[in-house]
Image (cartoon, rainbow, N blue to C red):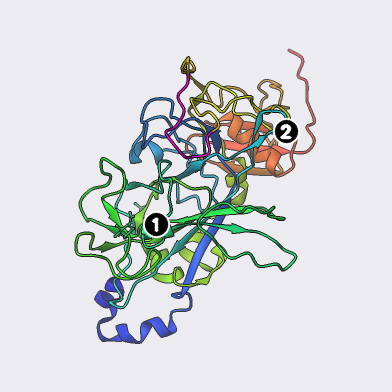
């Protein structure tokens, strides 16, 4: 509670009792921004070893830093102040009869907790540009006394009321309503390094537990605890534009009970579901198919032969060729046609039903924004404006 202490002096002890949301956490859901074989933390600048699904800021890219990322037009998460990227390996379903791999659609839920331990350490906003990796694709055994391993768990969703306890591995049974993979990121920072060689050792789990507690002396700066629910081995690149907003939210909305984003003023100010739903990647993706329900793959992208995880990882002979990059959004989204330019009338707008602005407006973004709101026509103007309408009355002018 350091900032409140500075402002209110002795009142500090009373304040947590009257602040309405100090015991809440916030969360948001997001569809992937893109699914592609990139990992700018582990494999910067090149095609990564396996496919990831990525959510968050639209300038996700093979190599980037905080300044690049925060130029993003939008985030697939509701809070547009948070242009961070969050990514996880893409899970595939293997059909033993057909020998095919189908990507399982991923939906992310991201939680922010403020979870101090007995010392009640202050929970800080992320240092600008922090990046980290939790989990490991190389781990083959579960060490139940290790926090890093405890931080990864699976939950079998069954809305009929059966309870399947969370466990450290996949279930042997069918999960009627889906499988949730979840991971807690470490919340204690060494106070110095925004990244480290293994992308993990600048961060540590608290002393008492993987999800709460006091920070060790080696990693004394207590940050927010991020929980992802999707798939294991996940990466995080900070893109919170303004750390005061994140800090205000942590101070007021991030304890242990859920707080809707709408009840958290620091975040609600930049919540925009229409923009989140329209948000598409702006830069490049890997030029290869990642599969779909209607066109499953016969081999996973990269060198990832079927392997049950015992013994050494199988090699590929020959090694698959490495694809290049391709523009993620060079064309209009499918179903859209370019109708050309038109003059705006002198009274009223040609496309008057909905609008948004962004410092770097693009035609694909505007088309997605309007489609998301159900409008079939979209138009951009003045480099930063987007307008939508249901019916266009075309006026022809005879020259
Ligand atoms: C399991 O984790 C604990 C705690 O980190 C560690 O002390 C122990 O050596 C680990 N055991 C194995 C077999 O790796
Ligand atoms: C950051 O957010 C705070 C709180 O909303 C605001 O007062 C401040 O002006 C913002 N800073 C910038 C640089 O936008």
- Tell which circle, 1 or 2, labels the residue nearer the N-terminal end: 1
Where 318 falls versus 17 (above or below)?
above
Q: Look at the image and tell me in which quarter the N terminus lies.
A: bottom left
Quadrant of the image occupied by residue 251:
bottom left
Badge 1 local density, few (<14 within 10 Å), some, or many (20+)?
A: few
- Check if residue 267 falls in the magenta segment: no
Q: Look at the image and tell me in which quarter the C terminus lies.
A: top right
Q: Residue at x 54, y 26 (%)?
A: 301
The number of numbered badges drawn on the structure is: 2
Measured from the top left, where is residue 216 in percent x and y?
24, 65
Determine if residue 348 is in view: no
Determine if residue 73 is in view: yes
Q: Which residue bears the numbered disc 2?
A: 377
- Check if residue 315 falls in the magenta segment: yes
**Left or right of 356, for residue 6:** left
Q: Which residue bears the numbered disc 1?
A: 143
Quarter of the image where ligand 1 sits: bottom left
**Left or right of 273, for residue 40:** left
Tell whether circle 1 marks a residue whose Cβ is less than 8 angstroms from ligand 1: yes
Measured from the top left, where is residue 159 in percent x and y?
72, 63
Quadrant of the image occupied by residue 149:
bottom left
Where 327 falls versus 108 (above or below)?
above
- Which residue is more in the foreground, 92 or 257? 92
Given this view, does label 1 or label 2 mark the residue nearer the observer?
A: 1
- Which residue is more in the foreground, 221 or 264? 221
Badge 2 local density, few (<14 within 10 Å), some, or many (20+)?
A: many
Q: Which residues are magenta?
A: 307-316
Callout 2: SS: strand
Measured from the top left, where is residue 274 in percent x and y?
62, 47
């Amino acid at each position: 509670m350091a900032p409140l202490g500075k402002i209110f002096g002795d009142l500090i002890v009373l304040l947590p009792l009257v602040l309405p949301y100090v015991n809440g956490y916030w969360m948001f859901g997001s569809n992937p921004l893109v699914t592609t074989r990139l990992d700018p933390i582990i494999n910067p600048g090149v095609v990564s070893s396996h496919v990831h699904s990525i959510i968050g800021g639209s300038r996700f890219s093979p190599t980037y830093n905080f300044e690049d990322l925060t130029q993003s037009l939008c985030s697939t998460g509701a809070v547009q102040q948070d242009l961070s990227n969050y990514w996880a390996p893409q899970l595939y379903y293997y059909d033993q009869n057909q020998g095919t791999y189908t990507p399982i659609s991923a939906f992310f839920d991201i939680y922010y907790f403020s979870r101090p331990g007995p010392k009640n350490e202050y929970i800080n906003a992320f240092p600008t540009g922090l990046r980290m990796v939790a989990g490991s694709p190389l781990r083959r055994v579960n060490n139940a006394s290790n926090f890093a391993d405890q931080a990864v768990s699976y939950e079998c969703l069954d809305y009929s009321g059966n309870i399947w306890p969370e466990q450290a591995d996949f279930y042997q049974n069918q999960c009627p309503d889906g499988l949730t993979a979840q991971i807690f990121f470490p919340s204690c920072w060494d106070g110095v390094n925004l990244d480290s060689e293994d992308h993990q050792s600048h961060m540590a789990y608290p002393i008492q537990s993987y999800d709460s507690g006091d920070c060790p002396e080696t990693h004394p700066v207590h940050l927010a605890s991020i929980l992802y629910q999707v798939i294991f081995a996940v990466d995080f690149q900070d893109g919170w534009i303004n750390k005061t907003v994140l800090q205000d939210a942590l101070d007021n909305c991030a304890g242990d009970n859920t707080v809707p984003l709408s009840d958290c003023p620091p975040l609600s100010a930049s919540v925009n579901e229409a923009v989140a739903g329209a948000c598409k990647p702006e830069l490049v993706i890997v030029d290869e198919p990642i599969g779909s329900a209607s066109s499953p793959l016969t081999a996973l992208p990269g060198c990832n032969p079927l392997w049950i995880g015992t013994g050494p990882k199988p090699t590929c002979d020959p090694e698959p060729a490495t694809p290049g990059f391709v523009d993620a959004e060079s064309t209009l989204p499918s179903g859209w046609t370019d109708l050309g330019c038109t003059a705006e009338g002198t009274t009223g707008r040609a496309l008057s039903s909905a609008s948004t602005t962004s410092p770097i407006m693009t035609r694909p973004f505007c088309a997605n924004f309007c489609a998301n709101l159900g409008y079939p026509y979209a138009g951009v103007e003045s480099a930063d404006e987007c307008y939508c309408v249901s019916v266009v009355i075309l006026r022809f002018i005879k020259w």
